[in-house]
Amino acid sequence: MKKAPIFYNCRKCPAYCCSYPRIIVTEADIARLAKHHGIGIEKARKKYTKPGHEEGERVLRHKGDEHYGTVCRFLNRKTRACTVYEGRPEACREFPGPGRCGYYDFLCFERNAQEDPDFISTTWNA
Ligand code: SF4
Ligand code: SF4
């Protein structure tokens, strides 16, 4: 089957999606993160996740970020890359879905409109 074209490039984006406050992690995600770090599941649950808004929900913990306020604790604030790529949760693997990313469309529009290819740079200082 022919692959659908992709109109975004995460390497040219400062990882806006990693600033979402509600990145839900499942039990399988926690187990994967634990294995990735070589620690126990309960330790990983406490260290990497916190309660979400819904009953029983767990979401990724955040840390401060000078540009988006806060970002996922696993984002490298300098390179804007995921530091646990092989162990990242399912939600991160699936996002943004087929074809397009709304934020990347916005970035391209603004970089073009402002004639500044570095508008919202991807190489900030941590
Ligand atoms: S916001 Fe879109 S383009 Fe940027 S890192 Fe996330 S999925 Fe990739
Ligand atoms: S686990 Fe990685 S891809 Fe997922 S939100 Fe955190 S930094 Fe982004």
Image (cartoon, rainbow, N blue to C red):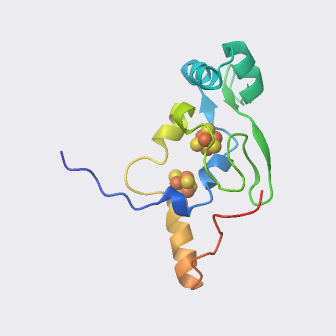
Task: Give the quarter of the figure containing the N terminus.
Answer: top left
Asked whether residue 34 appears in the rendered view, the answer is yes
Q: Which residue occupies the foreground of this view, 108 or 37?
A: 37
Q: Is residue 74 above or below residue 48?
A: below
Q: Which residue occupies the foreground of this view, 63 or 102?
A: 63
Q: Is residue 38 above or below residue 91?
A: above
In the picture, measured across the screen, residue 73 lies left or right of residue 1, that is: right
Q: Residue furthest bottom?
A: 115
Task: Give the quarter of the figure containing the C terminus.
Answer: bottom right
Residue 36, percent across and down? 60, 25
Residue visible at 52% across and 34% down in the picture = 86
Count the numbered circles shown: 0
Residue 17, percent across and down? 60, 50
Q: Residue furthest front?
A: 38
Q: Can you tell which quarter of the image residue 39 is in?
A: top right
Residue 43, percent across and down? 74, 17
Residue visible at 61% across and 45% down in the picture = 82
- Please state the quadrant of the image where ligand 2 appears: top right
Residue visible at 56% across and 23% down in the picture = 32
Q: Can you tell which quarter of the image residue 23 is in?
A: top right
Asked whether residue 51 appears in the rendered view, the answer is no
Q: Is residue 4 above or below residue 51?
A: below
Residue 24, percent across and down? 62, 32
Q: Which residue occupies the foreground of this view, 52 or 45?
A: 45
In the picture, measured across the screen, residue 50 lies left or right of residue 16, that is: right
Residue visible at 74% across and 35% down in the picture = 61
